Amino acid sequence: MSQPSVILATASYDHTIRFWEAETGRCYRTIQYPDSHVNRLEITPDKHYLAAACNPHIRLFDVNSNSPQPVMTYDSHTNNVMAVGFQCDAKWMYSGSEDGTVKIWDLRAPGCQKEYESVAAVNTVVLHPNQTELISGDQNGNIRVWDLRANSCSCELVPEVDTAVRSLTVMWDGTMVVAANNRGTCYVWRLLRGKQTMTEFEPLHKLQAHNGHILKCLLSPANKYLATASSDKTVKIWNVDGFKLEKVLTGHQRWVWDCVFSVDGEFLVTASSDMTARLWSMPAGKEVKVYQGHHKATVCCALHD
Amino acid sequence: MNHFAVQPNAFAAGGDLRSSSVSVVERDQTTVVCPKPRRIGLRNNHHHPSRSLRCYFSHQLELCESKAETDILDIILTKDGYGAEQVNKQVIDSPSPFLCGSPPSRVANPLTQDARFRDEIVSVSSVIPPQLGLPPSSSPSSSSGRKGGCVVRGNFGNSPKVRVEGFDCLDRDSRNCSIPALA
Protein backbone atom coordinates (compact mmCIF):
# COMPACT_ATOMS: atom_id res chain seq x y z
CA MET A 1 0.00 0.00 0.00
CA SER A 2 1.55 3.29 -1.08
CA GLN A 3 1.62 6.13 1.36
CA PRO A 4 -1.08 8.68 0.52
CA SER A 5 0.12 12.22 0.03
CA VAL A 6 -2.61 13.52 2.29
CA ILE A 7 -3.44 11.62 5.45
CA LEU A 8 -6.83 12.45 6.92
CA ALA A 9 -8.17 10.48 9.85
CA THR A 10 -11.12 10.84 12.19
CA ALA A 11 -12.27 9.05 15.33
CA SER A 12 -15.76 8.63 16.64
CA TYR A 13 -17.76 7.42 19.60
CA ASP A 14 -18.79 4.51 17.39
CA HIS A 15 -15.41 3.04 18.39
CA THR A 16 -13.85 3.38 14.96
CA ILE A 17 -11.01 5.28 13.42
CA ARG A 18 -11.49 6.05 9.73
CA PHE A 19 -9.01 7.07 7.07
CA TRP A 20 -10.36 9.20 4.22
CA GLU A 21 -9.35 10.25 0.76
CA ALA A 22 -9.40 13.99 1.31
CA GLU A 23 -10.27 14.81 -2.27
CA THR A 24 -13.04 12.29 -2.92
CA GLY A 25 -14.38 11.78 0.58
CA ARG A 26 -14.06 8.01 0.34
CA CYS A 27 -13.27 6.04 3.46
CA TYR A 28 -10.50 3.61 2.54
CA ARG A 29 -9.71 2.13 5.95
CA THR A 30 -11.58 1.53 9.19
CA ILE A 31 -10.05 0.43 12.46
CA GLN A 32 -12.40 -1.02 15.04
CA TYR A 33 -11.65 0.19 18.53
CA PRO A 34 -14.00 -1.70 20.85
CA ASP A 35 -12.37 -1.30 24.25
CA SER A 36 -12.29 2.46 24.58
CA HIS A 37 -13.06 5.71 22.85
CA VAL A 38 -10.54 8.01 21.23
CA ASN A 39 -10.11 11.50 22.60
CA ARG A 40 -7.36 12.77 20.33
CA LEU A 41 -5.60 11.81 17.12
CA GLU A 42 -2.16 12.93 15.99
CA ILE A 43 -0.01 11.97 13.02
CA THR A 44 3.75 11.69 13.45
CA PRO A 45 5.86 14.27 11.60
CA ASP A 46 7.25 11.55 9.31
CA LYS A 47 3.69 10.40 8.47
CA HIS A 48 4.49 6.84 9.52
CA TYR A 49 2.15 6.54 12.49
CA LEU A 50 -1.16 7.71 13.82
CA ALA A 51 -1.38 8.14 17.58
CA ALA A 52 -4.73 7.58 19.24
CA ALA A 53 -5.15 8.95 22.75
CA CYS A 54 -7.71 6.90 24.65
CA ASN A 55 -8.65 5.85 28.17
CA PRO A 56 -6.07 5.22 29.50
CA HIS A 57 -3.83 4.07 26.65
CA ILE A 58 -1.99 5.70 23.81
CA ARG A 59 -1.73 3.50 20.75
CA LEU A 60 0.21 3.89 17.55
CA PHE A 61 -1.13 2.56 14.26
CA ASP A 62 0.94 2.14 11.13
CA VAL A 63 -0.39 4.54 8.52
CA ASN A 64 0.88 2.37 5.67
CA SER A 65 -0.76 -0.83 6.83
CA ASN A 66 -4.23 -2.27 6.85
CA SER A 67 -3.65 -4.00 10.14
CA PRO A 68 -6.22 -3.26 12.83
CA GLN A 69 -3.62 -3.94 15.50
CA PRO A 70 -1.55 -1.10 16.95
CA VAL A 71 2.19 -1.33 16.51
CA MET A 72 2.75 0.07 20.00
CA THR A 73 0.74 0.71 23.13
CA TYR A 74 1.78 3.08 25.90
CA ASP A 75 0.32 2.25 29.29
CA SER A 76 1.16 4.61 32.08
CA HIS A 77 -1.69 7.04 32.42
CA THR A 78 -4.52 6.04 34.71
CA ASN A 79 -7.31 8.04 33.16
CA ASN A 80 -8.46 9.61 29.90
CA VAL A 81 -5.59 10.79 27.75
CA MET A 82 -6.79 14.11 26.36
CA ALA A 83 -3.70 15.36 24.53
CA VAL A 84 -0.94 13.77 22.50
CA GLY A 85 1.78 15.17 20.27
CA PHE A 86 5.27 14.63 18.94
CA GLN A 87 8.63 16.32 19.00
CA CYS A 88 9.50 17.54 15.52
CA ASP A 89 11.89 14.63 14.83
CA ALA A 90 9.48 12.08 16.31
CA LYS A 91 12.05 11.02 18.87
CA TRP A 92 9.66 11.51 21.72
CA MET A 93 5.98 11.96 22.38
CA TYR A 94 4.14 13.99 24.99
CA SER A 95 0.71 13.43 26.50
CA GLY A 96 -1.70 14.97 28.96
CA SER A 97 -4.33 13.12 30.93
CA GLU A 98 -7.27 13.55 33.26
CA ASP A 99 -5.15 11.71 35.81
CA GLY A 100 -3.51 15.09 36.35
CA THR A 101 -0.18 14.37 34.71
CA VAL A 102 1.82 15.39 31.68
CA LYS A 103 4.19 12.72 30.43
CA ILE A 104 7.13 12.44 28.07
CA TRP A 105 7.65 9.17 26.21
CA ASP A 106 10.78 8.10 24.42
CA LEU A 107 9.51 6.40 21.29
CA ARG A 108 12.66 4.29 21.10
CA ALA A 109 12.35 2.89 24.61
CA PRO A 110 9.51 1.39 26.62
CA GLY A 111 7.79 3.19 29.42
CA CYS A 112 7.23 6.74 30.45
CA GLN A 113 10.44 8.75 30.74
CA LYS A 114 9.25 11.85 32.56
CA GLU A 115 6.14 12.82 34.43
CA TYR A 116 4.96 16.25 35.47
CA GLU A 117 2.34 16.46 38.20
CA SER A 118 -0.36 18.98 37.40
CA VAL A 119 -2.82 17.74 40.04
CA ALA A 120 -5.96 18.80 38.19
CA ALA A 121 -7.21 16.96 35.12
CA VAL A 122 -5.19 18.04 32.11
CA ASN A 123 -7.35 18.93 29.12
CA THR A 124 -4.76 20.16 26.65
CA VAL A 125 -1.01 20.22 26.04
CA VAL A 126 1.01 21.91 23.30
CA LEU A 127 4.70 21.86 22.53
CA HIS A 128 6.44 25.18 22.07
CA PRO A 129 8.16 25.33 18.66
CA ASN A 130 11.53 25.56 20.42
CA GLN A 131 10.91 21.92 21.44
CA THR A 132 12.00 22.53 25.03
CA GLU A 133 8.81 23.63 26.72
CA LEU A 134 5.37 22.16 27.10
CA ILE A 135 2.33 24.27 27.90
CA SER A 136 -0.58 22.54 29.60
CA GLY A 137 -4.09 23.64 30.51
CA ASP A 138 -6.17 21.96 33.17
CA GLN A 139 -9.70 21.67 34.51
CA ASN A 140 -9.02 24.20 37.28
CA GLY A 141 -8.08 26.94 34.85
CA ASN A 142 -4.30 26.69 35.30
CA ILE A 143 -1.96 27.15 32.37
CA ARG A 144 1.49 25.83 33.16
CA VAL A 145 4.74 26.17 31.29
CA TRP A 146 6.97 23.14 31.82
CA ASP A 147 10.68 23.58 31.25
CA LEU A 148 11.79 20.21 29.93
CA ARG A 149 15.47 20.92 30.53
CA ALA A 150 15.07 22.06 34.11
CA ASN A 151 12.20 19.64 34.72
CA SER A 152 10.21 22.27 36.49
CA CYS A 153 7.20 24.51 36.09
CA SER A 154 8.57 27.88 35.12
CA CYS A 155 5.30 29.77 34.96
CA GLU A 156 1.65 29.44 35.88
CA LEU A 157 -1.02 31.62 34.31
CA VAL A 158 -4.59 31.62 35.59
CA PRO A 159 -6.70 34.07 33.58
CA GLU A 160 -9.93 32.79 35.17
CA VAL A 161 -9.69 30.84 38.39
CA ASP A 162 -11.66 27.58 38.35
CA THR A 163 -12.70 27.95 34.73
CA ALA A 164 -11.49 24.96 32.75
CA VAL A 165 -8.93 25.62 30.05
CA ARG A 166 -10.24 23.55 27.19
CA SER A 167 -7.70 24.16 24.46
CA LEU A 168 -4.29 25.73 23.92
CA THR A 169 -2.50 26.70 20.74
CA VAL A 170 0.85 28.29 20.06
CA MET A 171 1.94 30.08 16.91
CA TRP A 172 4.31 28.01 14.82
CA ASP A 173 7.05 30.61 15.30
CA GLY A 174 6.51 30.84 19.05
CA THR A 175 5.34 34.43 19.12
CA MET A 176 1.85 33.91 20.45
CA VAL A 177 -0.12 31.55 22.66
CA VAL A 178 -3.91 31.33 22.93
CA ALA A 179 -5.97 29.62 25.62
CA ALA A 180 -9.68 28.92 25.23
CA ASN A 181 -12.02 28.09 28.08
CA ASN A 182 -15.44 26.67 28.78
CA ARG A 183 -17.01 30.12 28.90
CA GLY A 184 -16.25 30.88 25.28
CA THR A 185 -13.35 33.21 26.06
CA CYS A 186 -9.93 33.21 24.42
CA TYR A 187 -6.95 34.72 26.20
CA VAL A 188 -4.03 35.74 24.04
CA TRP A 189 -0.47 36.34 25.19
CA ARG A 190 2.35 37.66 23.10
CA LEU A 191 5.60 35.86 23.78
CA LEU A 192 8.50 38.27 23.96
CA ARG A 193 12.11 37.21 23.87
CA GLY A 194 13.76 38.40 27.05
CA LYS A 195 17.28 38.27 28.43
CA GLN A 196 19.06 34.96 28.87
CA THR A 197 16.49 33.08 26.76
CA MET A 198 13.71 34.02 29.16
CA THR A 199 10.45 34.67 27.41
CA GLU A 200 7.93 37.12 28.72
CA PHE A 201 4.20 36.51 28.53
CA GLU A 202 2.56 39.79 27.63
CA PRO A 203 -1.25 39.81 27.92
CA LEU A 204 -2.38 40.87 24.49
CA HIS A 205 -6.08 40.36 24.01
CA LYS A 206 -9.18 38.96 25.66
CA LEU A 207 -11.57 37.66 23.02
CA GLN A 208 -15.16 36.70 23.78
CA ALA A 209 -15.36 34.34 20.85
CA HIS A 210 -18.45 32.29 21.66
CA ASN A 211 -21.30 32.22 24.13
CA GLY A 212 -20.75 28.57 24.91
CA HIS A 213 -17.87 26.16 25.26
CA ILE A 214 -14.90 26.55 23.00
CA LEU A 215 -13.90 22.98 22.35
CA LYS A 216 -10.84 23.72 20.24
CA CYS A 217 -8.76 26.76 19.35
CA LEU A 218 -6.08 26.62 16.69
CA LEU A 219 -3.70 29.14 15.20
CA SER A 220 -3.13 28.85 11.50
CA PRO A 221 0.35 27.81 10.37
CA ALA A 222 0.36 30.81 8.05
CA ASN A 223 0.30 33.32 10.91
CA LYS A 224 -2.98 34.70 9.75
CA TYR A 225 -5.98 33.12 11.46
CA LEU A 226 -7.24 31.77 14.73
CA ALA A 227 -9.98 29.14 14.45
CA THR A 228 -12.32 28.49 17.35
CA ALA A 229 -14.64 25.46 17.30
CA SER A 230 -17.58 25.63 19.65
CA SER A 231 -20.58 23.96 21.19
CA ASP A 232 -22.70 26.53 19.36
CA LYS A 233 -22.22 24.43 16.18
CA THR A 234 -20.01 27.00 14.50
CA VAL A 235 -16.37 27.54 13.78
CA LYS A 236 -15.27 31.15 13.83
CA ILE A 237 -12.23 32.47 12.02
CA TRP A 238 -10.48 35.44 13.60
CA ASN A 239 -7.78 37.61 12.13
CA VAL A 240 -4.87 37.63 14.55
CA ASP A 241 -4.14 41.26 13.69
CA GLY A 242 -6.64 42.87 15.99
CA PHE A 243 -8.75 39.72 16.35
CA LYS A 244 -11.43 40.82 13.98
CA LEU A 245 -13.99 38.18 13.06
CA GLU A 246 -13.32 37.15 9.48
CA LYS A 247 -15.74 34.29 8.88
CA VAL A 248 -18.26 32.04 10.55
CA LEU A 249 -18.28 28.49 9.23
CA THR A 250 -21.79 27.10 9.49
CA GLY A 251 -23.03 23.72 8.41
CA HIS A 252 -22.43 21.40 11.31
CA GLN A 253 -25.63 20.41 13.07
CA ARG A 254 -24.14 19.84 16.52
CA TRP A 255 -21.07 20.54 18.67
CA VAL A 256 -17.83 21.01 16.80
CA TRP A 257 -15.16 19.17 18.77
CA ASP A 258 -11.98 19.49 16.78
CA CYS A 259 -10.38 21.25 13.85
CA VAL A 260 -7.08 21.11 12.00
CA PHE A 261 -5.51 23.33 9.32
CA SER A 262 -3.82 22.17 6.18
CA VAL A 263 -0.09 22.91 6.10
CA ASP A 264 -0.59 26.05 4.02
CA GLY A 265 -3.53 27.27 6.06
CA GLU A 266 -5.82 27.31 3.05
CA PHE A 267 -8.09 24.51 4.30
CA LEU A 268 -9.62 23.51 7.59
CA VAL A 269 -11.03 20.13 8.60
CA THR A 270 -13.59 19.99 11.40
CA ALA A 271 -15.12 17.13 13.41
CA SER A 272 -18.59 17.27 14.91
CA SER A 273 -21.18 15.45 16.99
CA ASP A 274 -23.34 15.38 13.86
CA MET A 275 -21.26 12.32 12.88
CA THR A 276 -19.43 14.11 10.09
CA ALA A 277 -16.13 15.72 9.36
CA ARG A 278 -16.04 18.61 6.91
CA LEU A 279 -13.44 20.27 4.75
CA TRP A 280 -13.63 24.05 4.45
CA SER A 281 -11.97 26.51 2.13
CA MET A 282 -10.57 29.37 4.16
CA PRO A 283 -10.55 32.03 1.43
CA ALA A 284 -14.15 31.24 0.47
CA GLY A 285 -15.40 30.35 3.91
CA LYS A 286 -17.36 27.54 2.29
CA GLU A 287 -17.73 23.83 2.81
CA VAL A 288 -15.83 21.82 0.23
CA LYS A 289 -16.39 18.22 1.28
CA VAL A 290 -18.34 16.22 3.83
CA TYR A 291 -16.88 12.98 5.20
CA GLN A 292 -19.75 10.69 6.16
CA GLY A 293 -19.54 7.19 7.55
CA HIS A 294 -19.34 7.38 11.30
CA HIS A 295 -22.41 6.24 13.21
CA LYS A 296 -21.91 8.42 16.27
CA ALA A 297 -20.30 11.73 17.18
CA THR A 298 -17.01 12.42 15.45
CA VAL A 299 -14.85 13.87 18.18
CA CYS A 300 -11.39 14.30 16.72
CA CYS A 301 -9.54 14.60 13.45
CA ALA A 302 -5.97 14.59 12.20
CA LEU A 303 -4.57 15.92 8.95
CA HIS A 304 -1.09 15.74 7.50
CA ASP A 305 -0.64 16.95 3.94
CA MET B 1 -54.57 -22.26 120.84
CA ASN B 2 -52.55 -24.35 118.52
CA HIS B 3 -54.61 -23.10 115.64
CA PHE B 4 -54.07 -19.52 116.77
CA ALA B 5 -50.36 -20.15 117.15
CA VAL B 6 -50.11 -21.17 113.49
CA GLN B 7 -51.59 -17.92 112.23
CA PRO B 8 -48.75 -15.68 113.55
CA ASN B 9 -46.23 -17.88 111.81
CA ALA B 10 -48.07 -17.42 108.57
CA PHE B 11 -48.08 -13.64 108.89
CA ALA B 12 -44.46 -13.50 109.94
CA ALA B 13 -43.31 -15.43 106.87
CA GLY B 14 -45.51 -13.54 104.41
CA GLY B 15 -42.75 -12.63 101.95
CA ASP B 16 -41.27 -16.07 101.82
CA LEU B 17 -44.68 -17.59 101.53
CA ARG B 18 -45.47 -15.44 98.52
CA SER B 19 -42.35 -16.41 96.62
CA SER B 20 -42.78 -20.01 97.65
CA SER B 21 -46.38 -19.79 96.61
CA VAL B 22 -45.36 -19.04 93.05
CA SER B 23 -42.94 -21.92 92.89
CA VAL B 24 -45.47 -24.25 94.49
CA VAL B 25 -48.09 -23.33 91.94
CA GLU B 26 -45.68 -24.14 89.14
CA ARG B 27 -44.78 -27.41 90.80
CA ASP B 28 -48.43 -28.32 91.18
CA GLN B 29 -49.08 -27.67 87.54
CA THR B 30 -46.22 -29.88 86.44
CA THR B 31 -45.98 -32.66 89.00
CA VAL B 32 -49.06 -33.03 91.23
CA VAL B 33 -52.02 -34.82 89.77
CA CYS B 34 -55.14 -34.79 91.95
CA PRO B 35 -58.83 -35.44 91.37
CA LYS B 36 -60.66 -32.29 90.59
CA PRO B 37 -63.10 -32.60 93.54
CA ARG B 38 -60.26 -32.77 96.00
CA ARG B 39 -58.36 -29.91 94.45
CA ILE B 40 -61.49 -27.72 94.31
CA GLY B 41 -62.44 -28.68 97.82
CA LEU B 42 -58.98 -27.94 99.06
CA ARG B 43 -58.98 -24.47 97.56
CA ASN B 44 -62.57 -23.60 98.54
CA ASN B 45 -62.55 -24.85 102.12
CA HIS B 46 -59.02 -24.18 103.26
CA HIS B 47 -57.60 -21.94 100.58
CA HIS B 48 -55.45 -19.66 102.61
CA PRO B 49 -54.62 -21.87 105.61
CA SER B 50 -53.95 -25.03 103.64
CA ARG B 51 -51.99 -23.21 100.96
CA SER B 52 -50.05 -21.39 103.63
CA LEU B 53 -49.34 -24.61 105.39
CA ARG B 54 -48.07 -26.33 102.30
CA CYS B 55 -45.85 -23.41 101.55
CA TYR B 56 -44.64 -23.33 105.09
CA PHE B 57 -43.98 -27.01 104.96
CA SER B 58 -42.01 -26.83 101.76
CA HIS B 59 -40.09 -23.82 102.93
CA GLN B 60 -39.18 -25.42 106.19
CA LEU B 61 -38.04 -28.59 104.50
CA GLU B 62 -35.98 -26.57 102.04
CA LEU B 63 -34.30 -24.41 104.63
CA CYS B 64 -33.78 -26.24 107.96
CA GLU B 65 -36.17 -29.17 108.29
CA SER B 66 -36.93 -28.47 111.95
CA LYS B 67 -38.35 -31.46 113.80
CA ALA B 68 -40.64 -29.45 116.03
CA GLU B 69 -42.23 -27.62 113.12
CA THR B 70 -42.59 -30.84 111.22
CA ASP B 71 -44.40 -32.44 114.11
CA ILE B 72 -46.86 -29.60 114.35
CA LEU B 73 -47.56 -29.74 110.65
CA ASP B 74 -48.00 -33.48 110.79
CA ILE B 75 -50.56 -33.11 113.52
CA ILE B 76 -52.54 -30.48 111.67
CA LEU B 77 -52.45 -32.28 108.37
CA THR B 78 -53.48 -35.52 109.99
CA LYS B 79 -56.50 -33.83 111.49
CA ASP B 80 -57.59 -32.44 108.11
CA GLY B 81 -56.99 -35.64 106.26
CA TYR B 82 -56.56 -33.94 102.88
CA GLY B 83 -53.19 -32.56 103.71
CA ALA B 84 -51.87 -35.97 104.64
CA GLU B 85 -52.78 -37.39 101.30
CA GLN B 86 -51.25 -34.48 99.46
CA VAL B 87 -48.02 -34.78 101.39
CA ASN B 88 -47.81 -38.41 100.53
CA LYS B 89 -48.33 -37.73 96.86
CA GLN B 90 -45.72 -35.04 96.87
CA VAL B 91 -43.20 -37.43 98.32
CA ILE B 92 -44.14 -40.13 95.87
CA ASP B 93 -44.41 -38.05 92.73
CA SER B 94 -41.44 -35.73 93.09
CA PRO B 95 -38.69 -35.63 95.72
CA SER B 96 -38.77 -32.31 97.52
CA PRO B 97 -35.02 -31.66 97.70
CA PHE B 98 -34.65 -31.67 93.91
CA LEU B 99 -37.70 -29.54 93.34
CA CYS B 100 -36.73 -27.13 96.07
CA GLY B 101 -33.32 -26.68 94.48
CA SER B 102 -34.49 -25.84 90.98
CA PRO B 103 -35.64 -22.24 91.54
CA PRO B 104 -32.26 -21.06 92.83
CA SER B 105 -30.49 -22.72 89.92
CA ARG B 106 -32.89 -21.05 87.52
CA VAL B 107 -32.24 -17.75 89.21
CA ALA B 108 -28.51 -18.27 88.85
CA ASN B 109 -28.75 -19.16 85.17
CA PRO B 110 -29.78 -15.68 83.99
CA LEU B 111 -26.83 -14.18 85.78
CA THR B 112 -24.59 -16.63 84.04
CA GLN B 113 -26.21 -15.76 80.76
CA ASP B 114 -25.79 -12.09 81.56
CA ALA B 115 -22.13 -12.70 82.16
CA ARG B 116 -21.88 -14.49 78.86
CA PHE B 117 -23.67 -11.61 77.19
CA ARG B 118 -21.16 -9.27 78.74
CA ASP B 119 -18.38 -11.47 77.44
CA GLU B 120 -19.97 -11.35 74.00
CA ILE B 121 -20.14 -7.56 74.19
CA VAL B 122 -16.49 -7.50 75.15
CA SER B 123 -15.62 -9.85 72.33
CA VAL B 124 -17.58 -7.70 69.89
CA SER B 125 -15.76 -4.65 71.21
CA SER B 126 -12.47 -6.39 70.72
CA VAL B 127 -13.41 -7.03 67.08
CA ILE B 128 -14.10 -3.34 66.44
CA PRO B 129 -10.46 -2.13 66.62
CA PRO B 130 -9.31 -4.42 63.79
CA GLN B 131 -12.26 -3.28 61.68
CA LEU B 132 -11.43 0.34 62.39
CA GLY B 133 -7.85 -0.42 61.50
CA LEU B 134 -8.70 -1.83 58.07
CA PRO B 135 -9.19 1.47 56.21
CA PRO B 136 -5.77 2.87 57.13
CA SER B 137 -4.11 -0.39 56.13
CA SER B 138 -6.03 -0.60 52.86
CA SER B 139 -5.19 2.95 51.80
CA PRO B 140 -1.43 2.43 51.66
CA SER B 141 -1.84 -0.76 49.67
CA SER B 142 -4.14 0.99 47.22
CA SER B 143 -1.70 3.84 46.89
CA SER B 144 1.26 1.54 46.50
CA GLY B 145 -0.67 -0.45 43.90
CA ARG B 146 -1.31 2.67 41.87
CA LYS B 147 2.30 3.73 42.18
CA GLY B 148 3.50 0.29 41.31
CA GLY B 149 1.46 0.35 38.15
CA CYS B 150 3.12 3.56 37.00
CA VAL B 151 6.85 3.15 36.50
CA VAL B 152 8.21 6.63 36.07
CA ARG B 153 11.86 7.47 35.66
CA GLY B 154 11.38 11.12 36.51
CA ASN B 155 8.53 12.68 38.43
CA PHE B 156 8.42 16.42 38.84
CA GLY B 157 6.18 18.69 40.81
CA ASN B 158 4.16 21.67 39.81
CA SER B 159 5.56 24.44 41.99
CA PRO B 160 5.72 27.33 39.57
CA LYS B 161 8.41 29.96 39.79
CA VAL B 162 5.88 32.55 38.71
CA ARG B 163 2.12 32.46 39.16
CA VAL B 164 -0.20 35.10 37.76
CA GLU B 165 -3.93 35.14 38.34
CA GLY B 166 -6.12 37.29 36.17
CA PHE B 167 -5.53 38.86 32.81
CA ASP B 168 -4.68 42.55 32.44
CA CYS B 169 -4.13 43.64 28.88
CA LEU B 170 -5.19 47.30 29.11
CA ASP B 171 -1.71 48.75 28.84
CA ARG B 172 -0.17 46.72 26.08
CA ASP B 173 2.69 49.12 25.52
CA SER B 174 3.95 48.83 29.05
CA ARG B 175 6.24 45.92 29.79
CA ASN B 176 5.09 45.90 33.39
CA CYS B 177 2.28 43.61 32.32
CA SER B 178 4.70 40.98 31.03
CA ILE B 179 5.24 37.79 32.96
CA PRO B 180 8.82 36.57 32.72
CA ALA B 181 9.09 32.87 32.13
CA LEU B 182 11.08 30.43 30.12
CA ALA B 183 8.79 29.44 27.27
Image (cartoon, rainbow, N blue to C red):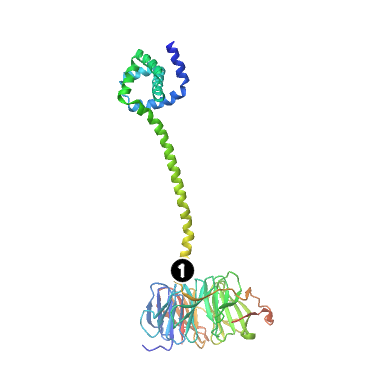
Q: Is residue B155 visible?
A: yes
Q: Vertical placement of B92 versus A78: above or below? A: above
Which residue is painted at 48% across and 64% down in the image? B140
Q: Nearer the viewer, residue B67 or A113?
A: B67
**Residue A22 left/right relative to A146:** left
The residue that mark 1 highlights is B146
Residue A232, given in percent of the width and then of the height, sits at 52, 73
Instruction: Answer yes or no: is residue A242 visible.
Output: no
Q: Is residue B23 left or right of residue A282?
A: left
What residue do we see at 44% from left, 41% from top?
Answer: B115
Query: Where is residue A126 shown, x and y percent of the image?
Result: 53, 80
Q: Chain of mark 1?
A: B
CA neighbours of label 1 inside 10 A, class few (<14), some (14 to 19), many (20+)? few
* Placement of A297 over or under B77, stated as above or below: below
Quadrant hosting residue B28: top left
Q: Which quarter of the image is occupied by the N terminus of chain A?
A: bottom left
* Disc 1 element: helix
A170 versus B99 height, above or below: below
Which one is nearer the viewer's eye here, A26 or A156?
A: A156
Residue B111 drawn at (x, y percent): 44, 37
Q: Amino acid at mark 1?
A: Arg
Extreme residue in the front direction = B67
What number of labels is visible?
1
Residue at position x 44%, y 48% in the image = B123
